[in-house]
Amino acid sequence: MAFIDYYKILGIEKKASADDIKKAYRKLARKYHPDINPNDKEAEKKFKEINEANEVLSNAENRAKYDKYGEHWKHGEEYERAQQQQRQQQYPGNSGSGFSGADYGGSEDFSDFFQSMFGGNFGRSARGSASGKFKGQDISGELNLNLRDAYKTHQQTFEINGKKIRITIPAGVYDGQQIKLKGHGNPGMNGGPNGDLYITFNITEDKDFKREGDNLRASVDIDLYTAVLGGDVNIQTLDGSVKLKVKPGTQNGTTVRLKGKGFPIYKKENEFGDLYVTYNVKIPTHLTEKQKELFQQLKNS
């Protein structure tokens, strides 16, 4: 069984941080995503490898097992316990010696160890012999949303392993957030439970609003006359139009807060962040002679 180097697949060093892994995965996932490479079998294969590598390395517990057991990370501990029992049966007077993975010199030697331990039935045991029940492999993927989709609770349907899955996405999910769908991963082995499906949300930027946690930022143009004399201005929020009172003498760049008009707080019903609106004062152009004269009078007064 050939060793699968997940670090090499993601193009990172073995000492890479969790943030390095996330960045590498997201970059490669976008590059090889089936939507970007339709009918490209090689890209599809690469995309699956990238997801498999991320599923292992992005989980601290799975990564530790992989670093110890190599491609057999999912069942290494079970085999280790079985080998320890076997050694204790062979050497009952040495029950405290125990088996350590280090005795076998690294992940490249695990295939020979498993083969000697289970003989020619090793392949069949992984598919469902009496050697034990094993949970199926977890799988992961990304789901792209725009900011307005993430603003409201809604349903989406997608296909995994030939099955259509409908999920309800709660309002307020954030970029990079991951959720788990229990039992929607790969099938278990030898009657074991299915793996889980991990979905990471990728939320694209919006042209009108910038999200900062649960708050939003936006800007609105106001004319010079409204800035000087005061008045009303209508602005669009993600929840409809709102009329703001502009105070006389408002300076360019002034920011006002609209409480509760920001982004919904994840899984907190009827709770929202705030919306911060910055005024951009537009200086009039193409003035008539009369208007210029009036401005001159103001300047000289």
Image (cartoon, rainbow, N blue to C red):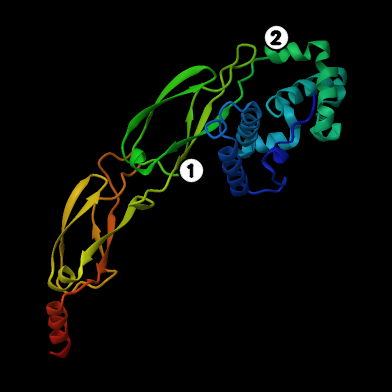
Where is mark 2, residue-wise? 130
- The amino acid on which the numbered mark 1 sits, given as a three-letter code, is Gly
- In the image, taking residue 293 as reference, residue 101 lies left or right, namely right
Q: Looking at the picture, tell me which residue is in the foreground, 68 or 186.
A: 186
- In the image, taking residue 263 as reference, residue 101 lies left or right, namely right
Where is mark 1, residue-wise? 176
Q: Quadrant of the C terminus?
A: bottom left
Under circle 1, the secondary element is loop
- The amino acid on which the numbered mark 2 sits, given as a three-letter code, is Ala
Q: Quadrant of the N terminus?
A: top right
In the rendered view, would you say 219 is above or below 157?
below
Q: Quadrant of residue 85?
A: top right
- In the image, taking residue 216 as reference, residue 235 lies left or right, namely left
Give the residue drawn at x 14%, y 83%: 293
Residue 44 visible somewhere in the drawing: yes
Please rate how many residues cluster around mark 2, counting C-alpha atoms within 10 Å: few if below 14, some from 14 to 19, many from 20: few
Find residue 131 and report its horizontal and vertical position in percent: 71, 13
Under circle 2, the secondary element is loop
Give the residue drawn at x 25%, y 62%: 221
Residue 89 visible somewhere in the drawing: no
Q: Looking at the picture, tell me which residue is in the foreground, 179 or 218.
A: 218
Q: Quadrant of residue 255?
A: bottom left
- In the image, taking residue 237 as reference, residue 62 lies left or right, namely right
Q: Looking at the picture, tell me which residue is in the foreground, 38 or 162.
A: 38
What whole-number distance in Å separates the C-alpha atoms at marks 1 and 2?
40 Å
Give the residue drawn at x 73%, y 27%: 72
Find residue 138 and report its horizontal and vertical position in percent: 58, 27
Which residue is outermost to the front?
289
Q: Which mark is residue 192?
A: none
Find residue 199 and report its horizontal and vertical position in percent: 49, 33
Give the residue drawn at x 71%, y 34%: 66
